[in-house]
Image (cartoon, rainbow, N blue to C red):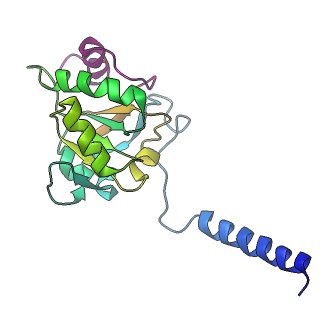
Amino acid sequence: MRSSVRWTVVVVVLAVAGIVALWPREGDTLPPTASDDATDPAVATTLNALDVVPVTPHDGGERGDLAAVVGEGPALVNLWATWCGPCVDELPVLDEYAAGQDAVPVFGVQVQSDRDAGRRMLDELGVGFPTVHEDGDQLRRLVRAPVMPTSFVVDAAGDIHRVEPPRAFASVDEVEQAVRSYLGGGR
């Protein structure tokens, strides 16, 4: 077989494999986009949808799903990665907020980075709020996290509100203001 014919076959096989991998399957759903919910573009989904996100606690607990970890709202959930400089700066701020008397529960989800490196980083930063590691990329896609870090607030009804605009919190006041804006005055 000539070289050009072999390369043509390779390209066709790779193209077919790519199409099969990306083709939607029955049961595949995406959370609503901003155009699907004009009243609140930050609502990505509900807490129930997080039961499909497998996570492993950094404290050595058993693997489970994120919905079980978060429990009922209200809560603040933060996606972070070890390679993300703003995440490194933000984690101690979130830890300080979490230790406050009026704070909603805070949960960290390490994504797109090595679990052991994340555990070491949390220890070095002295972060004590509950954190888990997600092996895949399901959560980031589910809540349509555009950047790292991304936070979202789970309200008492279980609705998930992505903090807009996505940003790294620089102070406890910023965290409190964001939580209040999605939960209203109460919790």
Q: Depth check: 79 or 184 in front? A: 79
Q: Is residue 4 left or right of residue 22?
A: right
Looking at the image, which residue sits at the far bottom? 1
Quarter of the rendering occupied by the N terminus: bottom right
- Up the image or down, 145 lies above or below 88; here it is below
Q: Residue at x 77, y 75 (%)?
A: 10
Q: Is residue 169 left or right of residue 137?
A: left
The stretch in magenta equals 164-187
Q: Residue at x 30, y 50 (%)?
A: 115
Q: Depth check: 118 or 98 in front? A: 118
Q: Position of residue 73 (x, y in %)?
A: 20, 37
Quadrant in the picture for residue 25:
bottom right
Work out whether residue 66 can be spotted: yes
Work out whether residue 162 can be spotted: no
Q: Is residue 168 left or right of residue 133?
A: right
Q: Residue 171 lies in magenta, yes or no?
A: yes
Q: Position of residue 182 (x, y in %)?
A: 31, 24
> Tag count in the figure?
0
Looking at the image, which residue sits at the far left? 101
Q: Residue at x 31, y 38 (%)?
A: 159
Q: Position of residue 158 (x, y in %)?
A: 26, 40
Q: Depth check: 98 or 155 in front? A: 98
Looking at the image, which residue sits at the far top? 173
Quarter of the rendering occupied by the C terminus: top left
Q: Residue 75 lies in magenta, yes or no?
A: no
Q: Position of residue 170 (x, y in %)?
A: 33, 16
- Up the image or down, 13 lies above or below 53; here it is below
Quadrant in the picture for residue 52:
bottom left
